[in-house]
Amino acid sequence: MTKLLDQALDAVRQLPATDQDDIARAIMRLTGRDDSQPVPLTPDEQVAIKRSKEAAARGEFATDEEVASVWAKHGL
């Protein structure tokens, strides 16, 4: 194991169990060893994705200023 991965795992050990499980699932997916089924989308989520894809196909994207505003709104 690399030193960086060992440090990352030490950091993960300090997190709550649910966060540890989320990170473990992400690692399993990244390594191709994830056998879980995809989480089904709700009808509202399916509609939102469809609208987003349609807007992208039309070239409708947020401006840099709009993106910066959203980030600032959330303190990021």
Image (cartoon, rainbow, N blue to C red):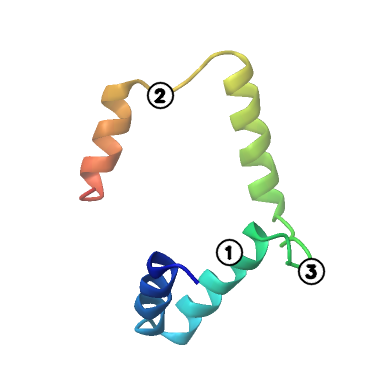
Q: Quadrant of residue 68?
A: top left
**Mark 1 lies on residue:** 26
Is 30 rendered above or below residue 58? Answer: below
Q: Which mark is residue 62?
A: 2
x 61%, y 40%: residue: 48
- Image mark for residue 54: none
- At horizontal 66% and vertical 61% (from top left) the residue drawn is 31
Residue 2, image x, y percentages: 45, 67
Residue 58, horizontal then vertical, whole percent: 60, 13
In the image, is residue 63 above or below residue 1? Answer: above
Across and down, in percent, residue 24 comes to 56, 73
Please, what secondary structure does the residue beneath circle 2 have? loop
Mark 3 vs mark 2: in front: 3
Amino acid of disc 2: Ala
Mark found first going from the N terminus, 3 or 2: 3
* Distance from Cα at disc 1 to Cα at disc 2: 28 Å
Disc number lying in front (1 or 2): 1
Specify the label residue 35 is tagged with.
3
Question: What residue sits 61% from the left and 70% below the top?
Answer: 25
**Are dots 3 and 2 in contact, CB under 8 Å?**
no
> Is residue 38 toward the left or the right of residue 71 in the image?
right
Of mark 1 and mark 2, the one earlier in the sequence is 1
Q: Earlier in the sequence, mark 1 or mark 3?
A: 1
Residue in the picture at 39% in, 69% down: 3
Place of residue 34 in the rendered image (x, y in percent of width and height, measured from the top left): 73, 67
